[in-house]
Image (tube, grey):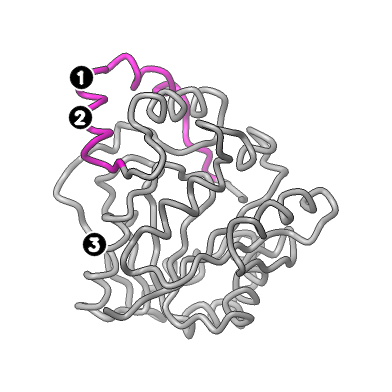
Amino acid sequence: MTVADAIIQARTCSTRLPGKVMLEIEGKSVLSHVCERVSRARSIKRVILALPDTPEDDALAAHARSLTDYVYRGSETDVLDRYYQAARRFGSTEIFRITSDCPLIDPEIVDNLHQSFQHARPDYMSNMIMPGLPRGLDAELFEFRSLERAWQEARQPHEREHVTPYIYQNPDLFDIKAHEEPIDRTNWRWTLDTDADFAFITAVYEALYKPGQQFGFADIESLLLQRPDLVEINAHVSQKIDHLI
């Protein structure tokens, strides 16, 4: 199997929940859980962390280096440049973009996306184009050459503050494919952006997490169908559109 690098962007100064990636769940940081879960995917070769080079993120960087040997620090606001420079530094060719606010990311879903990508060979593929999964299981996969073209050509502020808009908003320039899941759980929210989200994710971990073992989408789905009260913890939270991680 051809393997890809996962580049995870993270920062300390999140606007809605500052320091969220350093919050602890079951004795480990959110960032640690994300890295651990992503690394379990068969299609992942390396987990790379792309962090801002600001003093405020020094503690985060020190923690990141305890999780992976692959840490790059760059621009806080030009996230596209930070991301591109991380990929270039470590010689990435196929790249998963996964954000650090997804501590329930499922390795199997990552592998399913990779399998679809290998079959179709587009410039860019995502499971968000035709959404069926809860927010928080988002993943994008693209070639380095697509990222490099975006880095060279993107000019608008939102194209630099985020990594992939220049790619998926220009289907005339890039071959873009959707990875579809045969479900619709888009009414569930599994991402971490507010205190309510943290309470929900903590409750899921308390119910399912065991060190050294893995729980995934099916386990969480089963739990929530039995415990709909857990879904209500963050059901009121609206997704922030202009989201810089």
Which of 47 and 178 lies nearest the eye of the viewer?
47
Boundaries of the magenta span:
215-241
Which of the marked residues, 3 or 2, is nearer the chain's N terminus? 3
Which element is circle 1 on?
helix
Which of 157 and 45 lies nearest the eye of the viewer?
45
Question: Residue 35, percent across and down?
Answer: 50, 54
Q: Which numbered disc covers residue 226?
A: 1
Residue to which mark 3 is pinned? 112
Q: Residue furthest left?
A: 182
Question: Residue 98, percent across and down?
Answer: 46, 57
Which of 76 and 58 lies nearest the eye of the viewer?
58
Which element is circle 2 on?
helix
Which element is circle 3 on?
helix
Residue to which mark 2 is pinned? 222
Residue 17 vertical position relative to residue 116 in the rendered view, above or below: above
Q: Is residue 212 magenta?
A: no
Amino acid under label 1? Gln
Q: Write down the quadrant of residue 219 in the picture.
A: top left
Residue 86 vertical position relative to residue 12 in the rendered view, above or below: below
Amino acid under label 2? Ser
Residue 107 vertical position relative to residue 30 in the rendered view, above or below: below
- Crowd tier of the residue under label 2, counting other residues whose Cα lies within 10 Å: few below 14, some 14–19, many 20 or above: few
Task: Say left or right for 155 vs 231.
Answer: right
Whole-Å distance between the Cαs marked 2 and 1? 6 Å
Question: Residue 29, percent across and down?
Answer: 58, 40
Q: Residue at the location (50% across, 31% down)?
A: 26
Q: Residue at the location (32% across, 72% down)?
A: 176
Which of the marked residues, 3 or 1, is nearer the chain's N terminus? 3
